[in-house]
Amino acid sequence: MPNLSIRRLLLSLALTAMAVSAGMAKAQTPTPAFTPEEVGINEKLGATIPLDLELKDEDGKTVTLRQLIDKPTILTLNYFRCAGICTPQLGGVAEVLNRTEAVPGRDFQVLTVSFDERDEPEVAAQKRTNYLGEIKRPMPPTAWRFLTGPGATTKALADAVGFKFKRDKDDFVHAAAIIFLSPKGQVTRYMYGVTYLPADLQLAAQEAARGEAQPTINKFLKFCFSYDPVGRRYVLNTTSIGATVIILAALILVFALTRRGSKAKSEESQ
């Protein structure tokens, strides 16, 4: 097939991919209630969180992050009345705590902080009891703390780690990620989503112990999933995937046709 025909075919397929993507976006993607500047994760690797922030523990006692963070720490930012991704995310944390070879309470600890100032220590205590009940291995209760505090305080912590959320009536729109901190409160790694691999957690805890900030390699969630603020859940982003599949198919077809044309010319010259 002449090169001109191949170029025309490639252009036609590219235009088709763009049209399909636009059509799918119009038909399937709801108008977002937020912008990327308002909700998401702005990684701040190497930054140190404000350790003197005062929060309330499960008993209502005032504690500072400096008092709590004395070892590699996994920070999760949630709110306790969340009916969306908070529950599967914290369930994912419980699951990986059961499976990792690293020892909770010795090699690392977990701090779950509510960014909803309406959450009270009593609710935090109940959440802690619930999730500790999912742990099937020996683990001291102090290895996973649930904290609350004033909105300005928890917002300052969220800003320090680049966690952006937005209030939507009585709920919040936010992302799902766990954030690793060194014993000195330095941000060393982010892991996205609601499930985590035990080996990844163990490696990240070791890096945090050494104070080594590592870039995030796997950000697949940001591309293939988008947040549905109505259903408060992550949904498959068919627009991005559909366009990608079409473009890949076009490239494979063009490669095959080009190779066939080159083979035909080679046979004619022999």
Image (cartoon, rainbow, N blue to C red):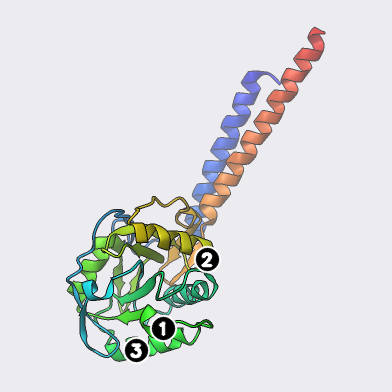
Q: In front: 106, or 25? A: 106
User: Who's the residue at 27% across and 66% down the image?
Assistant: 158
Tag 3's secondary structure?
A: helix
User: Who's the residue at 24% across and 89% down the image?
Assistant: 60
- Distance from Cα at disc 3 to Cα at disc 1: 15 Å
Tag 2's secondary structure?
A: helix
Amino acid under disc 3:
Ala
Vertical order, 255 against 57 (above or below):
above
Vertical order, 160 against 54 (above or below):
above
The tag earlier along the polypeptide, 2 or 3, is: 3
Q: Name the residue tied to disc 2.
A: 198
Q: Where is residue 233 in the image (x, y as percent from the top left)?
A: 46, 70
- Distance from Cα at disc 2 to Cα at disc 1: 19 Å
Camera sees residue 239: yes
Q: Position of residue 245 (x, y in %)?
A: 60, 46
- Distance from Cα at disc 2 to Cα at disc 3: 26 Å
Q: How many residues crowd mark 2 within 10 Å: few (<14), some (14–19), many (20+)?
A: some
User: Who's the residue at 22% across and 71% down the image?
Assistant: 66
Q: Name the residue tied to disc 1.
A: 140
Q: How many labels does the image show?
A: 3
Tag 1's secondary structure?
A: loop
The tag earlier along the polypeptide, 2 or 1, is: 1
The tag earlier along the polypeptide, 3 or 1, is: 3
Q: Name the residue tied to disc 3.
A: 125
Amino acid under disc 1:
Pro
